[in-house]
Image: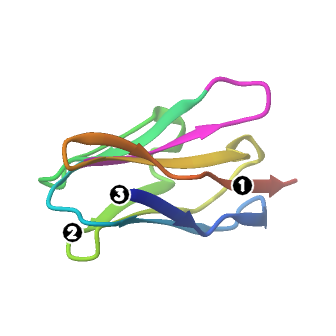
Amino acid sequence: QVQLVESGGGLVQAGGSLRLSCAASGIIFRIDAMGWYRQAPGKERELVATIASNGGTNYVDSVKGRFTISRDNAKGTVYLQMSSLKPEDTAVYYCNAILNGRGAWGQGTQVTVSV
């Protein structure tokens, strides 16, 4: 079946950068919107960024100017470039996409930003 496989999380100091990747796998004939969510300890899952099939993007206010979402349609991959990371960015990050008309989630990758 189709699925999303993400990677790129890790431990970084405040002010550092990380790049998350999320690749669709399986027999895929259509990918619509893609995005990234995060869930910090003790907090609800938060929508961080989205990118539409036409390339239009949206970001939660707290990451504007620091994070960039992009996609490579040929590879079926969505990326989240994170810079100027802050401790409050610490969370498990999950990618999401509409694959073949159905929602799919990545397995999550931990991002920890130390002070």
Q: Position of residue 108 (x, y in %)?
A: 61, 51
Which residue is depicted at the point 45% across and 35% down?
60
The residue located at (45%, 44%) in the rendering is: 64
Where is residue 72? Give x, y as percent: 27, 71
Mark 3 or mark 2, earlier in chain: 3
Give the answer, above or below, for where 39 lies relative to 9.
Answer: above
Magenta run includes residue 62:
no
Q: CA distance from mark 2 to mark 1?
A: 25 Å
Residue found 32% across the figure and 66% down from its top: 26
Which is more N-terminal, label 1 or label 3? 3
The region drawn magenta spans 33-44
In the rendered view, would you say 15 is above or below 95? below
Can residue 85 be seen by looking at this rendering?
A: yes
Q: Amino acid at mark 2?
A: Asn
- Please name the amino acid that badge 3 sits on: Val
| Residue behind mark 3 | 2
